[in-house]
Amino acid sequence: MQVYRRAAHPRYSAGRPVGAGAFFFRKEWVNTPAERTIQGRWALVPVRPAWSGRGWDRRQGHAGEQHLRCPASEVPPPSPEDVMSFLTVNGTTLYYELRGKGPSLLFISGAVGDAGQWSAVADGLADEFTVLTYDRRANSRSPRPEGWSTTTMDEQADDAAALVAALGLGPVAACGNSMGAIILTCLTLRFPEVVRGAVLHEPPLVAVSSAPDVVAKAIEDVVAAGMAEGGPPAAVERFQRWVAGDDAYESFDPDFRARLLTDGEVLFGVEVTPALNYLPAARELAEVRVPCVVTSGADNRDPSAAGYWLFECCQWLAGQLGVPVTETPGAHIPHLTHAPAFVDFLRPALTSFGS
């Protein structure tokens, strides 16, 4: 018998309590009577490199994620490295993760809005930064607000700003990918005091590409084929394969991939239209004083590449901000396909934003 007990636990970040209503999930493993006699009480903790060598068993945990089963007496104390919590901000409840220690760093996911997109990169930067990742509203582990059926990029940016404020982490260095880069652009325009520097990777500003109708039709066809094949989950899979490539999709962590497939209704029914219709005014971008780095994958710079339109979007945004387009490894999702190299790329840029 496997039973989980959810226990409230005070959260601390850099030695101070954070966020009213924040709590830490400590998942206790309650054994059958026979197991209890032999083994005693166990606890589930997140899989972390520092703990994985202790011989603890891997077990299935909250939301299907892998955790380590260890003796309760050996459970590491709560720290920024093992926080998996929820906060209610801006009228929605957001699942978030904190790890590491140092200047604050926020990652914003694109489609779909799952914090797991950033796990490898966040772990790689946790030696120097306090890293915040989160499931955007109604995605994966963040529950859907009652009656919520539409969104705007302003609302998404407001969620991020409210989460950062509730945790006392602002101003943050931030990095957004794809739709996450659109949300970060919006966040920078609406709340410049919250962002001390922004890395914007390939925001899909379709309207400024050289063939917006072609791009929109390509996306529509991919989604329609998936919907016909198997509804929103199949549409998510087809869309991710179209964006990332088959090899990259197959390499995704199985738990992360399983969560992605649950988010199709939100992505295609709520998010994608306002995201693809978003275009910030040139005059607003010209007034931005937050340091910005606009990035595009090396593989998308070739005019013959399927993702060249994303490079065109980056060229337009960089031109409005008065910065060059900086090349990253890979293509649209380097944080998933080239995580170690992307960490090496990000570190000096993030450090340049100060603390």
Image (tube, grey):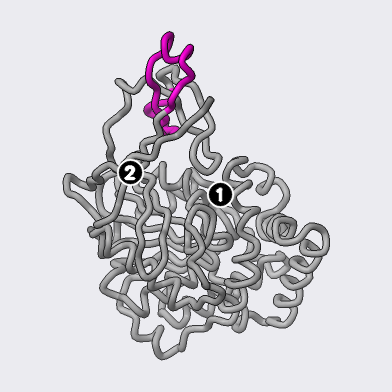
Residue farthest to the bottom, as pictured: 283
C-alpha separation, residue under disc 1 versus residue under disc 2: 27 Å
Image quadrant where one finds the C terminus: bottom left
Q: Give residue 178's position: percent from left, percent from top.
A: 55, 66
44 falls in the magenta region: yes
The residue type indicated by label 2 comes to: Phe
In this rendering, the answer to whether 33 lies above or below 52 is above
Total marks placed: 2
Examine the rendering and report whether any part of residue 229 can be seen: yes
Q: Give residue 193's position: percent from left, percent from top.
A: 26, 73
345 relative position to 102: left or right = right
Q: What residue is pinned by disc 2?
A: 24
Q: Residues within 10 Å of mark 2 (few under 14, many from 20)?
A: many
Q: What residue is pinned by disc 1?
A: 336
* Residue positioned 42% across, 70% down in the render: 184
Q: Give residue 197's position: percent from left, percent from top.
A: 33, 66
102 relative position to 94: left or right = left
Q: Residues within 10 Å of mark 1 (few under 14, many from 20)?
A: many
Q: Give residue 347's position: percent from left, percent from top.
A: 37, 51
255 falls in the magenta region: no
In this rendering, the answer to whether 286 lies above or below 64 is below
Residues marked 1 and 2 touching at CB (< 8 Å): no
* Residue positioned 62% across, 44% down in the render: 252
* Residue positioned 48% across, 43% down in the render: 120
Secondary structure at numbered mark 1 = helix
* Residue positioned 24% across, 57% down in the render: 20
Q: Which residues are magenta?
A: 29-52
Q: Toward the viewer: 136 or 250?
A: 136
126 relative position to 102: left or right = right
